[in-house]
Amino acid sequence: MSMIFGVPMAVLYGQLLIGVINGAFYALLSLGLAVIFGLLKIINFAHGAMYMLGAMGTVILFDTLGVNYWVALFLAPVLVGTVGVLIEYFLLRRIAGQDHIYSLLLTFGVALIMQGILTNIYGVSGLRYSMPDVFKGGVNLGFMFLPFYRAWVIVAALIVCFGTWFMIEKTKLGAYLRAGTEDSQLMQGFGINVPLLVSLTYGFGVMLAAFAGVLAAPIYSVTPVMGSHILIVVFAVVVIGGLGSIGGAIITGILMGVVEGLTKTFYPPASSAVIFLVMVVVLMVRPSGLFGKEA
Amino acid sequence: MTIMKKLLTTAVASAMMVGGAQAEISNNTVKIGYLADMSGTYRDLSGPNGLKALEMAVADFGGKVNGSKIEIVTADDRNSPDVASSTVRRWVENDNVDMVAGLVASSVTIATTKVLEENNKLGLVNGSAASSITNEHCTPNHIHYAYDTYPLANGTAGAIVKEGGKTWYILTADYAFGHSMEKDVTAVVEKNGGEVIGSIRHPFPTPDFSSFILQAQASGADVIALANAGADTTNAITTAAEFGVTQAGQTIAGLVVFLTDVHALGTEVAQGLQLTTGWYWDMNDEARAWSDRFMEETGARPTMVHAGIYSSTIQYLNAIEKTGSDDSQIVRKQMMETPINDMFATNGRIREDGRMIHDMYLAEVKKPEESSGEWDLYKIVRTIPADEAFRPLADSSCKLVSSK
């Protein structure tokens, strides 16, 4: 068996594939964050909590109403998106236009409240969610055993990411959105309801996070605190990709997943820190990020 | 004041002091402080339900001991040794707390028992795992009651090697607890004729184990051992199930697994998992009866930590009743002289290093078809007798062990 730095090729291919799968999660989450920050200039520290609500919502919907996975894929993000719209309308709108730090603190507080309430009700050990039957098992690719569900995650994430990018960059709705956040006075002068657009955008960004949460429910522990760790990593990914760039967030997400996967193969203890290392280097060499537009 | 008056005052004062020292309950109250993780990773295995167990013990005892009332205060230590130390310091120096119960994160226990030793109060440790608590970190002011990492490693690893699991691959959480667990397990595996063919140190905590499980699978080892706890363990087990590890013939050995972890995973994912536990709610009639009461109060079944808190508190109050005093050394000595056979421990006794030794149990998680209820999770495979399970005194580096 051929080796690279003491690691068999087969293991390396497997790790790269796992890296792409994890990267798909990062891409989905950083896309939502990039939409909210890039277009609305809100630092959304509640993003991890929205991801968590998507996952917990899927389990709760199943336990209480018997909602199956496929319905949950649409229903959970819509419900969480509604929560997002309400947060924007009642809370974030009051601090619109002020320093970024306020949106950071406000959304952070919202996240802590949600996590605290859910911890009190459900504890921290996690809720059970079985893998949908159609995805059970996997295929032996020769160099590794690939569970079907993980393959589905890549497909679903890429479809949604591409759809979002297309909508924002190539459609009229996306154009309104980009224009409205650049110069809202002018847009309102044209008769476009910019505040509504802002609410819906925040809701949409949150929906992306919740969708990632639904994808995560069968394979990761569903706990009230599952969002807090991943949030920090996703912020790093968005910074590396460039705070204004939608497409950049997607590509960087997948890239970072692969980088992390390689680190896990060659030097696992650093795998938690490597993304931040990359962030430091990128900020020093190219502060606006790999794909960012110079401000 | 004249010399005569001074002498008289001193004599009377001394007489009063001597009279007030020994067989008496301080402030006519026995005050117990419950210190545990109430909101973080270890909340479910101790937390608010542990407080309930403590309250049940006090209520069952009658709420009073020798005419003095029993009071309980609580605090959330957030798994931080700093927060815990300052809380305990305030409790023992200002609030007349006599005994500290709960004590979950090992780092918290090691820090707070120093404070207890300085102030000559007592700690009953039920949550913490590190065996160093009665080894290099032993003090005359605490008792380690429910379990520790030594019997967990010894029990699980020893049994699995004997069953044929010769080659081992260890997934270690990259911090002090994980390293020490890895060391203990390696020693046990090699002592029993097995071999550790590889290991990986993963960051603590790690949400995604797919990469590490893949490497463990590729190694071809008979056994994949998890030298981690809490969310890391449950994540690793879930991922292993997804990647078909057990179906392909490898065994997963969880080294620190609580009932609440297995409950969160469910039998479908965790079936076949081998683990060692200090107690199981369904293991005999007495345990079951108490667990039914616990279930009525809390809605959940108790872990060995909850049961240990109840049992140790009853033992503590018994000792106060017998000796008439709540002085930590008098009570501790009385507890050490009393054998323990109750709903928690069989063949239990407290050794000179403060370690309460009792029978431990090797358990296996039931298959879904074998389980008749949400909490019907373990089958007890083997009892490990008290003297075999824990670190022998001859190997101890505790300052209290007289042979040193």
Image (tube, helix red, strand yellow):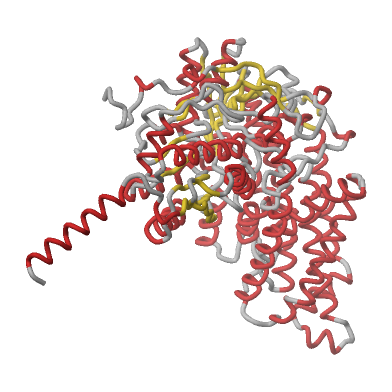
A238, above or below B237, in the image: below
Query: From this viewpoint, is residue A75 visible?
Result: yes
B338, above or below B220, in the image: below
Q: How many marks?
A: 0
Q: The C terminus of chain A is located in which quarter?
A: bottom right
| Between A20 and A123, the one nearer to me in the picture | A123
Q: Residue at x 73, y 50 (%)?
A: A122
* Rendered location of residue B401, percent (x, y): 31, 27
| Between B69 and A39, the one nearer to me in the picture | B69
* Rendered location of residue A48, percent (x, y): 69, 57
Q: Residue at x 47, y 51 (%)?
A: B30
Tell me which corner region of the image, top left, top right, bottom left or bottom right, holds residue B286: top right
* Rendered location of residue B325, percent (x, y): 39, 44
A97, above or below B380, in the image: below
Q: Using residue B322 as the reference point, say whether residue A83 is left or right of it.
A: right
| Between B64 and A238, the one nearer to me in the picture | B64
Tell me which corner region of the image, top left, top right, bottom left or bottom right, holds residue A85: bottom right
Q: Residue at x 59, y 46 (%)?
A: B62
Tell me which corner region of the image, top left, top right, bottom left or bottom right, holds residue A241: bottom right
Query: From this viewpoint, is residue B42 visible?
Result: no
Q: The N terminus of chain A is located in which quarter?
A: top right
* Rendered location of residue A71, percent (x, y): 92, 49
Q: Using residue B6 as the reference point, say whether residue B369 is left or right of it.
A: right
Query: Residue pushed farthest left?
Result: B3
Q: Using residue A79 as the reference point, say whether residue B251 is left or right of it.
A: left
